[in-house]
Amino acid sequence: MTTIDGHVYNGMPASDLGDHGWESPWSGPNGGQCVQTKQLADGRVALRQSTDPAGPALIYTPEEIAAFLAGVKRGLADHLAAG
């Protein structure tokens, strides 16, 4: 993994986190617009857009991911899919 001064930060180029270890747990209907995730060594999770693998990575703690998923399960993100 290549990073600036060894630091992983929100908005960094996802390509700096390496090519290996990315997974596509969520996929668009055509299979080409996926949100990809990568578990980082310190426990945080990186997200990137599959169509822009060198674009920005969003970095979240496990607690932030858990809170987001809990909200989704309670319907708090339904407005995002309303189109």
Image (tube, rainbow, N blue to C red):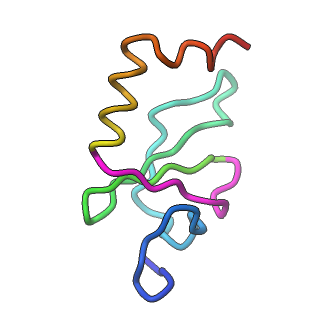
Q: Give the residue drawn at x 25%, y 64%.
A: 42
**Quadrant housing the N terminus:** bottom left
**Quadrant housing the C terminus:** top right
Tell me if 54 is positioned left or right of 10 in this view: right
Q: Is residue 14 magenta?
A: no
In the rendered image of this protein, does residue 17 appear above or below residue 25? Answer: below
Camera-side residue of 46 and 10: 10
Residues shaded magenta: 51-62
Specify the quadrant of the image occupied by residue 43.
Answer: bottom left
- Furthest residue to the bottom? 5
Residue 14 placement (x, y as % from top left): 56, 63
Q: Give the residue drawn at x 51%, y 62%.
A: 10
Q: Is residue 52 magenta?
A: yes
Tell me if 5 is positioned left or right of 80 in this view: left
Residue 12 placement (x, y as % from top left): 57, 68
Camera-side residue of 41 and 61: 61
